[in-house]
Amino acid sequence: MPVYKAYSPTTEINGKTVLTVVKGLGAFQSLGFHLLEKYGIKNPVTDAWYLQQSWLKVLKEIETWVGKATLKQIGKIIPENADFPTDIDSIRSALKAIDTAYHQNHRNGEVGHYTYLPMEERTVVMVCNNPYPCPFDEGLIEAMANKFKPESVKYVRVTHSDKTICRMKGGDECTYIVSW
């Protein structure tokens, strides 16, 4: 499925998640509010629901005008702003929880998935089949892994695999190798 195109025209995303656009723009928060309003999300509040397609249009415009690094930053702050399960206690449970959280923060239509595939002791694969851009997903995965890594782990590496055709190039999914 192509990025920036909701799988269903009725799919909604909650306001807590929508507002990460504003927080992710840092000093340029007014741009975030402007773009949200431009695509029909005027004065967003955390407990309301908005069309996912509108939010995807905002993300696409951010990529065009500000860049992919900003999309990654927005993805990185999702764990601090969206609803996530409360029983997360490790990198593995954090990465598994992304799909659960994704479905908690969206409703009224198909949204795709974040599939967790265990590999080696300190390696997992995340397969992203959703309408979000690669930098956004990479930031989200990296943030969740870093938030729950053991103290003995110095860093987490998230690598976009080229074993599948990337969504940004017309593929159906993207694969990330997460190692620590």
Image: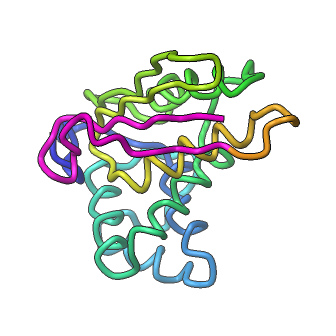
Residue at x-position 21% and y-position 53%: 168
Residue 135 % position (x, y): 41, 56
Outermost residue toward the front?
120
Q: Decide whether residue 61 is among the magenta residues.
A: no
Closer to the camera, 13 or 148? 148
Q: Which residue: 66% across, 35% down?
A: 180
Q: Residue furthest left?
A: 170
Kindly identify the residue that appears in the image at 46 percent across and 35 percent down. Answer: 177
- Name which residue lies at 45% across and 27% down: 125
Asked if residue 169 lies in the magenta stretch, the reply is yes
Residue 129 figure quarter: top left
Q: Is residue 52 left or right of residue 76?
A: left
Where in the figure is residue 38, as x and y percent of width and height? 31, 74
Would you identify the image quadrant in which residue 68 lies? bottom left
172 up-or-down from 28: above or below: above
Rendered location of residue 65, percent (x, y): 33, 82
The answer to whether 82 is drawn above or below residue 36 in the figure is above
Image quadrant holding the N terminus, namely top left
Nearest the eye: 94 or 117: 117
Extent of the magenta region = 156-180
Q: Is residue 109 left or right of residue 139?
A: left
- Is 105 on the left-hand or right-hand side of 83? left
Numbered marks: total: 0
Measuring from the top left, give residue 44's x and y in whole percent: 50, 61
Residue nearest the viewer, comparing 81 with 121: 121
Q: Is 17 displayed left or right of 161 in the figure?
A: right
